[in-house]
Amino acid sequence: MDKKPVLKIRGLTKKYGDVVGVKDLDLDVYLGEIMGFLGPNGAGKTTTIRCCLDLLQKTDGEVKIFGLDSHENAIEIRKRTGYLPGDFGMYDDLKVKTILNYLLSQSGVSDKTKMHELSDRLELDIGRRYGNLSKGNKQKVGIVQAFMADQDLIIMDEPTSGLDPLMQKKCYELFREERDNGKTIFMSSHILAEVEEVCDRVAIIRNARLQVVEKIDSLKDKMGKKLEIEFENDVDPKLFTMEGVEDFNLDGRHATMIVTSNLDEVIKRISKQNVMNMSFETFSLDQLFMTYYTSGGKGR
Protein backbone atom coordinates (compact mmCIF):
# COMPACT_ATOMS: atom_id res chain seq x y z
CA MET A 1 0.00 0.00 0.00
CA ASP A 2 1.56 3.28 -1.13
CA LYS A 3 -0.78 5.60 0.78
CA LYS A 4 0.66 7.89 3.41
CA PRO A 5 -0.27 6.66 6.88
CA VAL A 6 -2.68 8.73 8.96
CA LEU A 7 -1.31 6.99 12.06
CA LYS A 8 2.35 5.95 12.08
CA ILE A 9 3.83 4.12 15.06
CA ARG A 10 7.51 3.22 15.30
CA GLY A 11 9.19 1.41 18.18
CA LEU A 12 6.44 2.22 20.66
CA THR A 13 7.31 0.96 24.12
CA LYS A 14 5.53 1.56 27.40
CA LYS A 15 6.70 0.18 30.72
CA TYR A 16 5.00 0.36 34.10
CA GLY A 17 8.04 -0.16 36.28
CA ASP A 18 9.17 -3.68 35.49
CA VAL A 19 5.93 -4.52 33.70
CA VAL A 20 5.91 -4.09 29.92
CA GLY A 21 2.62 -2.76 28.55
CA VAL A 22 3.72 -2.67 24.92
CA LYS A 23 7.13 -3.39 23.36
CA ASP A 24 8.73 -2.14 20.10
CA LEU A 25 5.45 -1.80 18.24
CA ASP A 26 5.49 -0.68 14.59
CA LEU A 27 2.18 -0.05 12.87
CA ASP A 28 0.71 2.06 10.06
CA VAL A 29 -2.97 2.91 9.68
CA TYR A 30 -3.84 4.35 6.28
CA LEU A 31 -6.36 6.88 5.05
CA GLY A 32 -9.82 5.46 4.42
CA GLU A 33 -9.39 2.08 6.10
CA ILE A 34 -10.70 0.35 9.18
CA MET A 35 -7.82 -1.22 11.07
CA GLY A 36 -8.73 -3.77 13.71
CA PHE A 37 -6.42 -4.09 16.70
CA LEU A 38 -7.01 -7.56 18.05
CA GLY A 39 -5.99 -9.22 21.27
CA PRO A 40 -7.33 -10.42 24.63
CA ASN A 41 -7.57 -8.23 27.69
CA GLY A 42 -4.11 -7.27 28.92
CA ALA A 43 -2.38 -7.76 25.57
CA GLY A 44 -1.50 -4.06 25.19
CA LYS A 45 -4.33 -2.64 23.09
CA THR A 46 -5.49 0.09 25.45
CA THR A 47 -1.93 1.06 26.35
CA THR A 48 -1.12 1.50 22.67
CA ILE A 49 -4.20 3.66 22.05
CA ARG A 50 -3.58 5.88 25.06
CA CYS A 51 0.05 6.39 24.11
CA CYS A 52 -0.99 7.33 20.57
CA LEU A 53 -3.30 10.04 21.91
CA ASP A 54 -0.72 11.23 24.46
CA LEU A 55 -3.06 10.31 27.28
CA LEU A 56 -0.29 8.08 28.56
CA GLN A 57 3.38 8.99 28.38
CA LYS A 58 5.29 6.49 26.29
CA THR A 59 8.63 5.11 27.46
CA ASP A 60 10.17 5.04 24.00
CA GLY A 61 9.32 5.23 20.33
CA GLU A 62 7.57 7.66 18.02
CA VAL A 63 3.92 8.22 17.14
CA LYS A 64 2.81 10.52 14.34
CA ILE A 65 -0.79 11.33 13.47
CA PHE A 66 -1.50 13.36 10.32
CA GLY A 67 2.29 13.67 10.10
CA LEU A 68 2.37 15.47 13.47
CA ASP A 69 4.17 14.38 16.62
CA SER A 70 1.62 12.89 19.01
CA HIS A 71 3.11 14.72 22.02
CA GLU A 72 4.24 18.03 20.59
CA ASN A 73 1.05 18.52 18.57
CA ALA A 74 -1.44 16.73 20.80
CA ILE A 75 -4.01 19.55 20.85
CA GLU A 76 -4.05 19.95 17.08
CA ILE A 77 -4.34 16.19 16.62
CA ARG A 78 -7.29 15.92 19.00
CA LYS A 79 -9.19 18.55 17.03
CA ARG A 80 -9.18 16.14 14.10
CA THR A 81 -9.66 12.92 16.06
CA GLY A 82 -12.75 11.31 17.55
CA TYR A 83 -12.09 9.02 20.50
CA LEU A 84 -14.08 6.39 22.36
CA PRO A 85 -12.22 5.08 25.41
CA GLY A 86 -12.86 1.58 26.69
CA ASP A 87 -13.95 2.98 30.05
CA PHE A 88 -16.23 5.70 28.67
CA GLY A 89 -18.35 7.33 31.37
CA MET A 90 -20.07 10.65 32.09
CA TYR A 91 -21.83 12.44 34.96
CA ASP A 92 -24.95 10.51 35.94
CA ASP A 93 -27.07 13.59 36.73
CA LEU A 94 -26.65 15.21 33.32
CA LYS A 95 -28.98 14.62 30.41
CA VAL A 96 -27.44 12.96 27.38
CA LYS A 97 -28.14 15.97 25.14
CA THR A 98 -26.32 18.22 27.62
CA ILE A 99 -23.29 15.92 27.52
CA LEU A 100 -23.28 15.68 23.73
CA ASN A 101 -23.80 19.41 23.23
CA TYR A 102 -20.89 20.18 25.53
CA LEU A 103 -18.55 17.67 23.89
CA LEU A 104 -19.52 18.93 20.44
CA SER A 105 -18.74 22.50 21.47
CA GLN A 106 -15.31 21.39 22.70
CA SER A 107 -14.62 20.16 19.17
CA GLY A 108 -15.46 23.61 17.80
CA VAL A 109 -18.54 22.35 15.95
CA SER A 110 -21.87 24.20 16.17
CA ASP A 111 -23.90 22.11 13.71
CA LYS A 112 -25.82 19.47 15.68
CA THR A 113 -27.31 17.73 12.66
CA LYS A 114 -25.02 14.71 12.72
CA MET A 115 -25.38 14.38 16.48
CA HIS A 116 -29.15 14.03 16.12
CA GLU A 117 -28.89 11.76 13.09
CA LEU A 118 -26.58 9.37 14.93
CA SER A 119 -28.74 9.39 18.05
CA ASP A 120 -31.83 8.53 16.02
CA ARG A 121 -30.01 5.85 14.08
CA LEU A 122 -28.77 4.15 17.25
CA GLU A 123 -32.13 4.57 18.98
CA LEU A 124 -30.64 6.73 21.72
CA ASP A 125 -33.01 8.94 23.75
CA ILE A 126 -30.88 12.01 24.39
CA GLY A 127 -33.53 13.50 26.67
CA ARG A 128 -32.79 10.97 29.42
CA ARG A 129 -30.30 11.36 32.23
CA TYR A 130 -27.06 9.50 31.66
CA GLY A 131 -27.26 7.71 34.99
CA ASN A 132 -30.63 6.18 34.07
CA LEU A 133 -29.30 4.53 30.92
CA SER A 134 -28.50 0.85 30.53
CA LYS A 135 -24.90 -0.21 29.83
CA GLY A 136 -25.72 -0.58 26.14
CA ASN A 137 -27.27 2.88 25.87
CA LYS A 138 -24.29 4.42 27.68
CA GLN A 139 -22.09 2.83 25.04
CA LYS A 140 -24.25 4.39 22.34
CA VAL A 141 -23.53 7.81 23.87
CA GLY A 142 -19.83 7.05 23.50
CA ILE A 143 -20.21 6.02 19.86
CA VAL A 144 -22.28 9.10 18.99
CA GLN A 145 -19.76 11.47 20.57
CA ALA A 146 -16.90 9.77 18.72
CA PHE A 147 -18.46 10.40 15.30
CA MET A 148 -20.65 13.49 15.69
CA ALA A 149 -17.94 16.11 15.06
CA ASP A 150 -17.18 14.52 11.67
CA GLN A 151 -13.45 14.29 12.35
CA ASP A 152 -10.85 12.66 10.11
CA LEU A 153 -9.61 9.88 12.39
CA ILE A 154 -11.74 7.84 14.78
CA ILE A 155 -9.98 5.79 17.47
CA MET A 156 -12.14 3.40 19.50
CA ASP A 157 -11.37 0.96 22.29
CA GLU A 158 -13.84 -1.95 22.28
CA PRO A 159 -16.56 0.15 20.60
CA THR A 160 -19.51 -2.27 20.71
CA SER A 161 -19.03 -3.56 24.24
CA GLY A 162 -22.40 -4.02 25.94
CA LEU A 163 -24.49 -3.72 22.76
CA ASP A 164 -26.96 -6.38 21.69
CA PRO A 165 -26.29 -8.18 18.36
CA LEU A 166 -28.79 -6.11 16.36
CA MET A 167 -27.28 -2.83 17.57
CA GLN A 168 -23.80 -4.17 16.88
CA LYS A 169 -24.87 -4.72 13.27
CA LYS A 170 -26.09 -1.14 13.05
CA CYS A 171 -22.75 0.07 14.36
CA TYR A 172 -20.86 -2.02 11.82
CA GLU A 173 -22.91 -0.40 9.05
CA LEU A 174 -22.09 3.02 10.51
CA PHE A 175 -18.37 2.26 10.68
CA ARG A 176 -18.28 1.10 7.06
CA GLU A 177 -20.21 4.15 5.88
CA GLU A 178 -17.84 6.49 7.70
CA ARG A 179 -14.89 4.72 6.08
CA ASP A 180 -16.51 5.02 2.66
CA ASN A 181 -16.91 8.74 3.32
CA GLY A 182 -13.14 9.07 3.78
CA LYS A 183 -12.75 8.55 7.50
CA THR A 184 -9.95 6.44 8.98
CA ILE A 185 -10.88 4.13 11.85
CA PHE A 186 -8.53 2.42 14.29
CA MET A 187 -10.44 0.17 16.67
CA SER A 188 -9.39 -2.35 19.26
CA SER A 189 -11.51 -5.40 19.89
CA HIS A 190 -11.49 -8.88 21.33
CA ILE A 191 -14.70 -9.76 19.46
CA LEU A 192 -13.38 -11.81 16.58
CA ALA A 193 -16.57 -11.78 14.52
CA GLU A 194 -16.65 -7.99 14.77
CA VAL A 195 -13.16 -7.56 13.37
CA GLU A 196 -13.79 -10.10 10.62
CA GLU A 197 -16.99 -8.37 9.51
CA VAL A 198 -16.00 -4.72 9.60
CA CYS A 199 -12.22 -4.35 9.27
CA ASP A 200 -10.05 -4.07 6.17
CA ARG A 201 -6.89 -5.13 7.96
CA VAL A 202 -6.10 -6.62 11.33
CA ALA A 203 -3.16 -6.33 13.71
CA ILE A 204 -2.82 -9.07 16.30
CA ILE A 205 -1.01 -8.25 19.55
CA ARG A 206 0.13 -10.87 22.04
CA ASN A 207 1.88 -10.29 25.36
CA ALA A 208 2.63 -6.64 24.53
CA ARG A 209 4.21 -7.47 21.14
CA LEU A 210 2.72 -7.16 17.68
CA GLN A 211 2.52 -10.56 16.00
CA VAL A 212 1.02 -9.91 12.58
CA VAL A 213 -0.44 -7.12 10.43
CA GLU A 214 -2.34 -8.29 7.39
CA LYS A 215 -5.45 -8.00 5.30
CA ILE A 216 -7.93 -10.46 6.72
CA ASP A 217 -8.40 -12.38 3.46
CA SER A 218 -4.65 -12.56 2.87
CA LEU A 219 -4.10 -13.79 6.40
CA LYS A 220 -6.61 -16.58 5.88
CA ASP A 221 -4.89 -17.60 2.65
CA LYS A 222 -1.50 -17.74 4.37
CA MET A 223 -2.88 -19.78 7.23
CA GLY A 224 -4.44 -22.36 4.93
CA LYS A 225 -7.75 -24.17 4.62
CA LYS A 226 -9.02 -27.19 6.48
CA LEU A 227 -9.89 -30.21 4.34
CA GLU A 228 -11.83 -33.18 5.72
CA ILE A 229 -12.39 -36.31 3.63
CA GLU A 230 -14.09 -39.66 4.10
CA PHE A 231 -12.74 -42.24 1.64
CA GLU A 232 -14.62 -45.35 0.52
CA ASN A 233 -11.46 -47.47 0.65
CA ASP A 234 -8.17 -47.42 2.51
CA VAL A 235 -5.65 -44.88 1.23
CA ASP A 236 -1.90 -44.60 1.52
CA PRO A 237 -1.11 -41.67 3.85
CA LYS A 238 2.07 -41.05 1.84
CA LEU A 239 -0.22 -39.85 -0.94
CA PHE A 240 -0.52 -36.53 0.90
CA THR A 241 3.08 -36.21 2.00
CA MET A 242 3.81 -33.14 -0.06
CA GLU A 243 4.62 -29.47 0.15
CA GLY A 244 1.62 -27.40 1.19
CA VAL A 245 -0.06 -30.10 3.31
CA GLU A 246 0.26 -29.82 7.08
CA ASP A 247 -1.29 -31.52 10.10
CA PHE A 248 -2.33 -34.53 8.05
CA ASN A 249 -4.21 -37.09 10.12
CA LEU A 250 -5.68 -40.39 8.96
CA ASP A 251 -8.08 -42.28 11.21
CA GLY A 252 -9.25 -45.33 9.35
CA ARG A 253 -10.69 -43.92 6.13
CA HIS A 254 -11.28 -40.47 7.57
CA ALA A 255 -8.59 -37.88 6.80
CA THR A 256 -8.09 -34.28 7.85
CA MET A 257 -5.39 -31.88 6.71
CA ILE A 258 -4.49 -28.19 6.46
CA VAL A 259 -3.70 -27.07 2.91
CA THR A 260 -1.50 -23.98 2.69
CA SER A 261 -0.46 -24.31 -0.98
CA ASN A 262 -0.55 -26.69 -3.96
CA LEU A 263 -4.31 -26.99 -3.62
CA ASP A 264 -4.72 -28.05 -7.25
CA GLU A 265 -2.37 -31.00 -6.76
CA VAL A 266 -4.13 -32.03 -3.55
CA ILE A 267 -7.49 -32.04 -5.34
CA LYS A 268 -6.04 -34.09 -8.21
CA ARG A 269 -4.79 -36.74 -5.81
CA ILE A 270 -8.12 -36.85 -4.01
CA SER A 271 -9.99 -37.20 -7.32
CA LYS A 272 -8.17 -40.47 -8.02
CA GLN A 273 -9.75 -42.01 -4.89
CA ASN A 274 -13.32 -43.00 -4.17
CA VAL A 275 -14.64 -40.26 -1.92
CA MET A 276 -17.75 -40.66 0.24
CA ASN A 277 -17.81 -37.19 1.79
CA MET A 278 -15.63 -34.11 1.71
CA SER A 279 -15.77 -30.69 3.37
CA PHE A 280 -13.58 -27.68 2.69
CA GLU A 281 -13.41 -24.90 5.25
CA THR A 282 -11.64 -21.55 5.13
CA PHE A 283 -10.21 -20.55 8.47
CA SER A 284 -12.31 -18.06 10.39
CA LEU A 285 -10.59 -15.24 12.23
CA ASP A 286 -11.41 -17.12 15.42
CA GLN A 287 -9.33 -20.07 14.24
CA LEU A 288 -6.53 -17.79 13.06
CA PHE A 289 -6.46 -16.00 16.37
CA MET A 290 -6.27 -19.22 18.35
CA THR A 291 -3.55 -20.52 16.05
CA TYR A 292 -1.40 -17.48 16.77
CA TYR A 293 -2.02 -17.67 20.48
CA THR A 294 -1.44 -21.38 20.88
CA SER A 295 1.73 -21.41 18.76
CA GLY A 296 3.61 -18.70 20.61
CA GLY A 297 2.68 -16.06 18.07
CA LYS A 298 4.39 -17.62 15.06
CA GLY A 299 1.34 -18.84 13.22
CA ARG A 300 1.32 -22.19 11.53
Image (cartoon, helix red, strand yellow):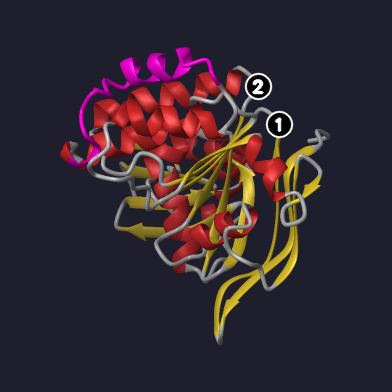
Q: Is residue 53 left or right of residue 1?
A: left
Point out which mark residue 182 bears: 2
Q: Is 166 part of what is drawn in magenta?
A: no
Q: Is residue 130 left or right of residue 105?
A: left
Asked which secondary structure carries label 1, the reply is loop
| Residue depicted at x 57% and y 32% | 107
Image location (x, y in percent) of residue 31: 71, 31
Q: Give the distance between the C-alpha atoms of the residues marked 1 and 2, in whole angstroms.
A: 7 Å
Point out which mark residue 31 bears: 1
| Residue depicted at x 83% and y 34% | 2
Image location (x, y in percent) of residue 120: 32, 15
| Residue depicted at x 36% and y 43% | 229
> Could you tell me if the residues under marks 1 and 2 are in contact, i.e. CB atoms within 8 Å?
yes
Ranked by sequence position, the earlier of labels 1 and 2 is 1
Q: Is residue 296 above or below residue 240?
A: below
Asked which secondary structure carries label 2, the reply is loop
Q: Is 119 part of what is drawn in magenta?
A: yes
Instruction: Tell me the magenta residue range.
Output: 110-131
Q: Is residue 56 above or below residue 87?
A: below
Image location (x, y in percent) of residue 272: 49, 36
